[in-house]
Image (cartoon, rainbow, N blue to C red):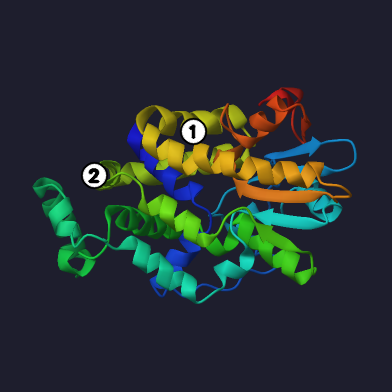
Amino acid sequence: MRRLKMFCLTMLAVAALASVALAVEKVATPQPTQNPPVATAKAPPLPLLWKVSDADNAVYLLGSFHLLKGDDYPLSADIDSAFAASDKVVFEVPPEQMTDPATAQKFLAAAGYGDGRTLTQVLPAALREKFARIVAQRGFSVAQFDGYEPWFINLSLMLGMADQMGFKPERGMDQYLMQRAATGNKPTAGLESIDTQLQVLDASPMDEQIVSLKEFLDKPLEMPQMLGDLHSAWRDGDVARLDKLTREEMRDKTPQTYRMINVDRNQAWLPQIQVMLDGSKQGSTLVVVGALHLLGDDGIVGKLREKGYKVERVCSACSEQQLSAL
């Protein structure tokens, strides 16, 4: 179960890849709208939102969940206010790269082997046989997946499970805010390119990819509960619980993947965010990234606080204890 949490976090921490994978698999998905459907009346999720200020402007840091349900909307009024107060919205990847037809081709290229190996060759015999039995039940063979690395198989399995639970990438917070920015003609940008994200995912150590696939295939019935727990912690705005379920597990069990997915990317993004604050006559900016990137000692929130910026959580519906977290 502990490694299962690591796997799901790894997949969810990579912004927008879920929607790209669905496009590659030719799953028909509706375009995001400014007002996603609301299945039932629920209180809006408590936002993972921080305001970082210097003398003349601010950067709002918003922790996203990349797969959401219809009843996760509407969002908190605090997010609406931060969006309205910002002159620009910055995502992990520029929105225009997400709609570029070449992106799906790049994704498939990254999912393949560059050294001539196949999935059959890299999987241990017992795991290969288990995977063969599972895909055979659905009318497929291992040979149909031979060209793809284990991380792509993991991602596809997770997406299929999440879809059955009602989670949709087109309903993810980042996708929703991209569409809202486009509708309102608000400028957007990205902290990194889709090429960089694909390189990070593709560079994941092969042994860790195999472990993740094994855990999924060994305990598939535990995966829905795990994803539900992560989503619940995010909806509750529970920083400590989300950090425990995700970042701490990943850091302790897979330090190489943690460094590549989280630490290195955060370090690359920090100078860009500082420019948003320190540049002359800069307006305020809303930065939307996966919630993982805001948590803990390696998170962007903590790093900016260490550099002396004023950092405060923005959550009008939170308790004092929640506001003091992180």
* Pair 2/1: label in front: 1
Q: Position of residue 290 (x, y in %)?
A: 57, 46
Dot 1, crowdedness within 10 Å: few (<14), some or many (≥20)? many
In the shown orientation, is residue 56 left or right of residue 176?
Answer: right
Residue at mark 2 to residue at mark 1: CA–CA distance: 21 Å
| Number of numbered discs | 2
Q: Position of residue 163 (x, y in %)?
A: 44, 60
In the shown orientation, is residue 23 left or right of residue 210?
Answer: right
Decide if residue 213 is in sight here: yes
Q: Nearer the viewer, residue 114 or 10?
A: 114
Callout 2 touching callout 1 (CB < 8 Å): no
- What residue type is disc 2 on? Lys
**Residue depicted at x 79% and y 69%:** 185
Can you say whether 150 is above or below 258 in the image?
below
Dot 2, crowdedness within 10 Å: few (<14), some or many (≥20)? many
Can you say whether 270 is above or below 196 in the image?
above
Q: Nearer the viewer, residue 118 or 178?
A: 118
Which residue position holds label 1? 247
Which residue position holds label 2? 214
**Residue depicted at x 33% and y 61%:** 111
In the shown orientation, is residue 312 left or right of residue 223?
Answer: right
**Residue depicted at x 13% and y 47%:** 124
Q: Residue furthest front?
A: 280
**Residue depicted at x 40% and y 27%:** 252
Q: Nearer the viewer, residue 8 or 89?
A: 89
Q: Quadrant of the C terminus?
A: top right
Q: Quadrant of the N terminus?
A: top left
